[in-house]
Image (cartoon, rainbow, N blue to C red):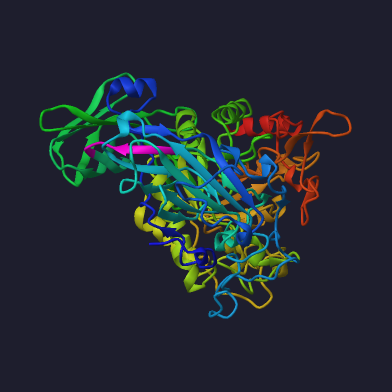
């Protein structure tokens, strides 16, 4: 198969030769490797790559992936990083509009009349910048002679991959890992990996988040070798009984490679006591069924208790060929008959924040130090929950939330703001994904990838279908996917509020503020387990809660923290004491999106926001709405958050 640039125009082509998503477990050769955090099966490709930039697809070098290419005119770029922050392209911050609005006429494929494919929309787009990456490497000795794949943890926005001159595959979805099998083309020495990254494709319509619009390989790249028998996927299902005292453990393992030897499953509590010890023969599917555990320690914000799982795969001679460690927790989230959200039988209160991944020098290419600092700030300010706005985060963030008891709303990489909200009005005239059949598979695939990757994390209490994308049959299909695959969590989506008439539940709310003028199909009974709004004033929240609420209520965004904001937070907090159906919300947002640059006049390092880079269109300082400045210095508003969130720890 050859690469086809026309895939950029086609919403039904979003993965080519990409391996299926699977659990985010690490694997090692033995316990010593695990203790050192170094696996013989892994080889990082981070660092300096050769790089060439083109302003649009016409100007790109089409043969850049050839092995014997003369690369004298290539520069160097760090991987991971953002192309724009290496001064190849203009920074641009924008919120509700799409970046090309008013400059280039585009409509989403099939969205207007169901027929127009919008061919050439991105494959010939004058604004579609291209980054051409090359990396020469030798395979580490420990990886040689094995099946080898590559994992790109994050690439904005669409990527084509070649190895040693051979086309390997194509991927979209900027914020979830993309893996490809390199085995047919890998060699021990002298490998040439080439990656072509386009800033725009049909994915741009559904990655229209309120943020700086970057591009490039902005998360880690790693080679992964497969042991002779390999744990490909793992689903951990810990459940808690009705008395919230005892539990049961189910474990489903999917193995690849040689079907010989044994699988030893070991689970220990935090004191090292063995609570599960079972051995099974190797097979493609191995299950540990319904193991009863008495007096289990429950996981929550105050006691983030984690059990340690080990999966040992041994060959017929009894030699360890693969070790998979994973920490998991027992917890139970549910909605009772009175429409109150419970965690482990107790009322759940969310003291949350929305958190973009952000570093004031690296953009969304955040570091482990950034993540650890954010957890520390959460703990210091009584923040117990995070919404991954509006995409999946780096893999270590989920583990950190497990370890520190941070409740998580794990959001899909989906926002299509510009296709349904125009000039402040609800007008879904060409909304995607909406109910457009050709956009269904891509968004359900994003739900699948989000679930399969992060399904084993106890911190995740809610799956969120996305953000500000209106509603429709396709988002309903995403919700059904989660319901069919996971009964241990709730499903959230806010945008469905734009399809329901709330005149009886919130009488003072004007219909034109949330409903489209021409009306729409009501999806409220199909989408979201909870009633979720953004920035609904406390008086109207109370109206809903006083009128026989049939769903628990939360604000997935509230207390917009721009300027000297967060005033009046107490009015929301008081509702927690009056109405058990109200369970809090997530402040918008945690950290400013600003970039630290050197001021040419003063010579000092200063923060720059949207519009400071001659970027048009821009929403200017609207990116500066965090509880912290972009350098992670808390703003005064954080004091109010610490106080009010401390009232309901």
Vertical relation: 175 (above or below) 40: below
Residue 534 coordinates in the image, percent (x, y) = 65, 53
- For the residue pair 549 and 276, the one nearer the viewer reads as 276
Vertical relation: 528 (above or below) 51: below
Quarter of the picture containing the C terminus is top right
Vertical relation: 317 (above or below) 617: above
- For the residue pair 615 and 524, the one nearer the viewer reads as 615
- For the residue pair 438 and 166, the one nearer the viewer reads as 166
Secondary structure of the magenta portion, mostly?
strand
Per the rendered image, the range of residues in magenta is: 222-229
In the rendered structure, the answer to whether residue 296 lies left or right of residue 46 reads: left
- For the residue pair 190 and 621, the one nearer the viewer reads as 190
Residue 500 seen anywhere in this rendered image of the structure? no
Residue 466 coordinates in the image, percent (x, y) = 54, 55
* Res 48 quadrant in image: top right
**Is 573 colored magenta in this rendering?**
no
| Residue that extends furthest to the left in the rendered view of this protein | 317
Residue at 46 percent across and 42 percent down: it is 460
Residue at 21 percent across and 38 percent down: it is 228
In the rendered structure, the answer to whether residue 316 lies left or right of residue 161 reads: left
| Residue that extends furthest to the right in the rendered view of this protein | 601
* Res 272 quadrant in image: top left
In the rendered structure, the answer to whether residue 557 lies left or right of residue 609 reads: left
Quarter of the picture containing the N terminus is bottom left
Residue 616 coordinates in the image, percent (x, y) = 78, 55
Residue 359 seen anywhere in this rendered image of the structure? yes
Vertical relation: 563 (above or below) 642: below
In this figure, what is the number of numbered marks?
Answer: 0
**Is 227 colored magenta in this rendering?**
yes
Residue 108 coordinates in the image, percent (x, y) = 59, 70
Residue at 35 percent across and 37 percent down: it is 244
């Amino acid at each position: 198969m050859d690469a086809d640039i026309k895939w950029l125009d086609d919403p039904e082509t979003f993965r080519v030769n990409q391996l299926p998503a699977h659990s985010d477990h690490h694997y090692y050769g033995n316990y010593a490797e695990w203790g050192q955090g170094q696996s013989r099966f892994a080889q990082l490709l981070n660092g300096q790559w050769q790089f060439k930039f083109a302003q649009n697809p016409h100007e790109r070098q089409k043969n850049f992936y050839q092995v014997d290419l003369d690369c004298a005119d290539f520069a160097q770029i760090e991987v991971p990083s953002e192309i724009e922050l290496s001064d190849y392209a203009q920074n641009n911050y924008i919120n509700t509009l799409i970046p090309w609005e008013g400059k280039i006429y585009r409509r989403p494929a099939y969205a207007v009349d169901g027929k127009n494919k919008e061919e050439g929309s991105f494959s010939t787009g004058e604004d579609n910048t291209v980054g051409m990456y090359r990396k020469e490497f030798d395979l580490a000795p420990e990886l040689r002679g094995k099946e080898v794949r590559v994992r790109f943890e994050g690439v904005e926005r669409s990527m084509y991959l070649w190895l040693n001159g051979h086309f390997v595959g194509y991927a979209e979805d900027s914020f979830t890992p993309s893996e490809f099998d390199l085995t047919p083309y890998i060699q021990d020495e002298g490998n040439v990996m080439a990656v072509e990254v386009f800033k725009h494709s049909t994915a741009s319509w559904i990655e229209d988040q309120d943020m700086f619009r970057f591009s490039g390989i902005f998360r880690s790249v790693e080679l992964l070798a497969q042991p002779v028998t390999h744990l490909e996927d793992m689903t951990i299902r810990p459940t808690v009984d009705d008395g919230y005292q005892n539990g049961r453990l189910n474990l489903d393992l999917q193995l690849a490679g040689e079907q010989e030897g044994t699988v030893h499953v070991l689970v220990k509590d935090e004191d090292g006591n063995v609570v599960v010890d079972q051995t099974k023969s190797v097979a493609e599917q191995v299950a540990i069924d319904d193991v009863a555990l008495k007096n289990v320690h429950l996981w929550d914000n105050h006691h983030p208790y984690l059990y340690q799982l080990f999966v040992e795969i041994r060959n017929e001679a009894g030699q360890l060929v693969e070790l998979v460690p994973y920490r998991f927790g027992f917890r139970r989230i549910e909605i009772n008959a009175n429409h109150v959200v419970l965690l482990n039988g107790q009322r759940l209160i969310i003291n949350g924040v929305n958190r973009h991944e952000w570093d004031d020098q690296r953009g969304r290419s955040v570091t482990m130090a950034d993540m650890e600092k954010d957890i520390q700030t959460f703990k210091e300010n009584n923040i117990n929950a995070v919404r991954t706005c509006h995409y999946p985060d780096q893999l270590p963030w989920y583990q950190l939330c497990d370890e520190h008891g941070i409740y998580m709303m794990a959001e899909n990489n989906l926002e299509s703001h510009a296709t349904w909200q125009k000039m402040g009005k609800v007008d879904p005239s060409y909304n995607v994904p909406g109910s457009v059949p050709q956009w269904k598979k891509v968004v359900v695939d994003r739900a699948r990838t989000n679930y399969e990757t992060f399904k084993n994390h106890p911190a995740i209490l809610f799956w969120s279908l996305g953000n500000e994308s209106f509603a429709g049959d396709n988002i309903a299909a995403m919700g059904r996917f989660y319901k069919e695959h996971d009964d241990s969590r709730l499903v959230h989506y806010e945008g469905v509020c734009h399809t329901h008439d709330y005149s009886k539940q919130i009488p003072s709310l004007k219909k034109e503020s949330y409903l489209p003028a021409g009306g729409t199909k009501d999806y409220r009974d199909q989408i979201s387990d909870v009633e979720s709004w953004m920035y609904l004033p406390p008086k109207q929240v109370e109206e809903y809660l006083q009128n026989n609420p049939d769903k628990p209520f939360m604000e997935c965004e509230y207390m917009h923290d721009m300027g000297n904001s967060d005033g009046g937070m107490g009015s929301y907090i008081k509702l927690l004491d009056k109405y058990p159906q109200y369970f809090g919300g997530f402040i918008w947002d945690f950290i400013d999106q600003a970039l630290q640059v050197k001021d040419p006049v003063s010579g000092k390092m200063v923060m720059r926001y949207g519009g400071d880079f001659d970027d048009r269109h821009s929403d200017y300082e609207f990116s500066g709405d965090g509880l912290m400045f972009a350098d992670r210095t808390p703003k005064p508003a954080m004091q109010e958050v610490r106080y009010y969130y401390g009232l309901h720890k």
